[in-house]
Structures are given as C-alpha cells and as structure tokens.
Image (spheres, grey):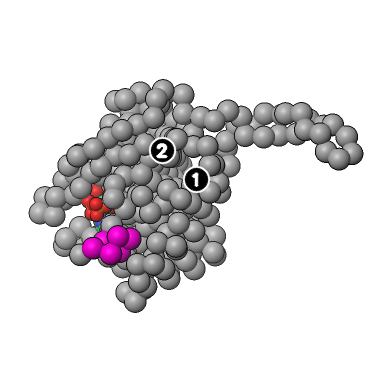
Amino acid sequence: MGNVVILNHPLIQHKISLLRREETGTNEFRSLIEEIAMLMGYEALRDLPLEDVEVKTPLETCMTPMIAGKKMAVVPILRAGLGMVGGLLALVPSARVGHIGLYRDPVTTEPHEYYCKLPTPIDERTIVVLDPMLATGGSAVAAIDFIKAQGGKKIKFMCVIAAPAGLDRLRASHPDIQIYVGHLDRGLNDHAYIVPGLGDAGDRIFGTK
Ligand code: PRP
Ligand code: URA
C-alpha cells in the first residue's frame, strides 16, 4: 500500500485488543495508548538521520552513530492525540511539541479548528502527527493541510485504528506523507464511528462522556 505501513507487530496487536475492550478503564486505557504509540514510533522513526560522533569508551575512542540534530516535532490532534505524546517523547525526549485543536461536528462530522501552535521553524523538522482514530479522515486531512500551509514538509501521520474510507481519503489528499496504522478496521457506522473500533478515544482517555 505504498506510503501506508500497517504495524502488525504482535505486541501492538495485543495492546490494541486490550484497548478496545469496553471494560478497560481510563487509567489502563491511557497507559496502553502511550505504550502503543511508543511501539509504533519505534517503527515510524526508523529513517531518522544518523551522524557519527566521537565517543570515548573505557577502552578507546571511536566514531559511533547518534541521531543527527534535534529536528523533530510531535503534533497531537487535540484532544485524543495527546494520549500518544508521552510514547513518542519517551523515544525522542528532545522533540518539540505542537498542538492542533480540532473537533468533529457530531452531526456533519466536519472538523472545526479551535487551536493551533506549531514549533518554528517547522519546515526543517520531521513532523509526526498523532491521532488515535482515523475515521472519515476529515480531521487528519485538515490538520495536515494546516501544517503544510505553515510550511511543514516532511510529515508522518500515526494512528492506532483506521477505517478504510479515512485511510483512502488521507492518502488521496496527501500522497506525499507517510502513514502508520496500528490496525485497519472494517468500516464506519451510521455516526461515522469506526467499527469495531474502541468508541470515542477522547472520552476514554480523559474519562469524559
Ligand atoms: C476524534 C478523533 C479524531 C477524529 C477522527 O476526535 O480523535 O480527531 O475524531 O474522526 P474523522 O477521521 O472522521 O475526522 P473528536 O472530534 O471526537 O475530538 P476529541 O478528540 O476532542 O474527542
Ligand atoms: N472519533 C473517535 O474517537 N472514535 C471513532 O470511532 C471515530 C471518531
């Protein structure tokens, strides 16, 4: 599927199944989503540039690879994307964090923007956009439109669960970005919720209804 990577690692699949369970409470849900984000990030960041630096071991001095520069930005789509931030920062603690606030109108399912703050200069950074759910794709497309309008170029999008319609829409709108998906679900219900899905990710992370 070209620019789409489905992360079918057994640990990720196991944790997504725990996440889906109706009886999984807020506390466990938060931990799981952060762990899944970290495991997904491990794969999504495998092309981070390296540079050889000089290191002195107890035995001798050698040239050895380290991540080049500190040019990464993690951008959660509020609210639910916030639940994934800790997992990425555990891997790259120096990453900058931007925020894009979008909510989906419950009737039209159209995304509405209410907040945006990105680190500058954004054009030089690898930008990892985080949202656990890719349903119709409207929110992800709008967020990436916005990041590109601000100058963002190297963009990766990471979601825990995707619906085929949302994935198709995101790929068609932004064929230049790399997309990482934890699990591709069957489809959307009449309310544009992913099925079987996990329900409302924001409500489950923050304990709201
Ligand atoms: C959810 C989810 C995505 C969006 C996905 O957010 O976190 O951002 O819906 O749906 P889409 O692909 O059809 O746009 P929601 O709007 O419920 O806001 P919240 O995170 O604040 O709960
Ligand atoms: N937003 C969610 O949180 N869950 C869905 O299934 C769809 C959109």
Q: Secondary structure at mark 1?
A: helix
Secondary structure mostly seen in the magenta stretch? helix
> Which mark is drawn over residue 89?
1
Residue 168 visible within the image:
no
> Can you tell which quarter of the image residue 10 is in?
bottom right
Quarter occupied by the C terminus: bottom left
Q: Quadrant of ligand 2?
A: bottom left
Whether residue 66 can be seen here = yes
Dot 1, crowdedness within 10 Å: few (<14), some or many (≥20)?
A: some
Residue 127, position in %: x, y?
Answer: 43, 35
Q: Residue furthest front?
A: 58
Task: Decide: few, some or many residues near mark 2? Use Cα within 10 Å; few <14, some 14-19, many ≥20.
Answer: some
> Which residue is found at the position 77% from the left and 33% from the top?
55
Whether 205 is among the magenta residues is yes
Residue 125 placement (x, y as % from top left): 46, 28
Q: Which mark is residue 97?
A: 2
Q: Position of residue 85 (x, y in %)?
A: 42, 48
- At horizontal 20% and vertical 47% (from top left) the residue drawn is 103
Where is residue 177? Give x, y as percent.
41, 36
In the image, residue 133 lies in the stretch drawn in magenta? no
Q: Amino acid at mark 1?
A: Leu
Q: Is residue 34 left or right of residue 197?
A: right
Indicate the amino acid at tag 2.
Answer: Val
Q: Secondary structure at mark 2?
A: strand
Decide: marks 2, 1 in contact (CB < 8 A)? yes
Q: Which residues are magenta?
A: 203-208
